[in-house]
Amino acid sequence: MDEPRTPVTGMTISVRTRRDVVVVDPDRFLAAARSAYRELNPGLTDAEVAEAVADVTDAAFALVERHGDLAPGPDRAGDPPLPGTRLADRPGGLSPAGRMRQVVLDERPLQDYGCFLPDDVFAPPTDH
């Protein structure tokens, strides 16, 4: 018979993710971002979409909002490219350039800060 499991309570798990891409085709990148924004906001005109997705930051947020990632899908099948190698044939004009994740336990949850977040929410936690 299995031992009863003790529930994990009161623990906070934070996942920090870094996803790097290189814009290899700015026109394709902006077009993909505007298309993603239009999918999320189908009633907007072309002019309204162009105004809403006007720069790199707007474009990055539009892609993340629509797809959950800046460059969805696997980075590349098989061996990763050598450092400095760019993949020019990727949809959206973005070449994957690395991905990292870090799990941090028992960090104060962002929700508990209320309206007054710390100065740098991405700073690594310090020892208590």
Image (cartoon, helix red, strand yellow):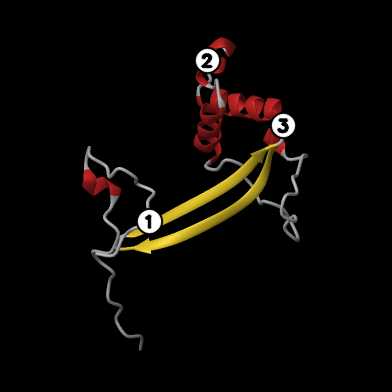
2 or 3: mark nearer the eye: 3
* Crowd band around label 1 with a 10 angstrom C-alpha radius: few (<14), some (14–19), many (20+): few
Q: Earlier in the sequence, mark 2 or mark 1?
A: 2
Tell me the residue that label 3 is attached to. Answer: 25
Amino acid type, callout 3: Asp
Query: Which of the labelled discs sits on residue 33, or is there none?
Result: none
Percent position of residue 10, x then y: 23, 64
- Earlier sequence position, callout 2 versus callout 3: 3
Callout 3: helix, strand or loop? loop
Q: Is residue 48 above or below residue 75?
A: above
Q: Are marks 1 and 3 in contact (CB under 8 Å)?
A: no
Query: The residue tagged with tag 2: helix, strand or loop?
Result: helix
Q: Which residue is mark 2?
A: 51
35 vs 83, left or right, is left
Q: Amino acid at mark 2?
A: Glu
Which residue in the rendered view is the most extreme toward the right? 89
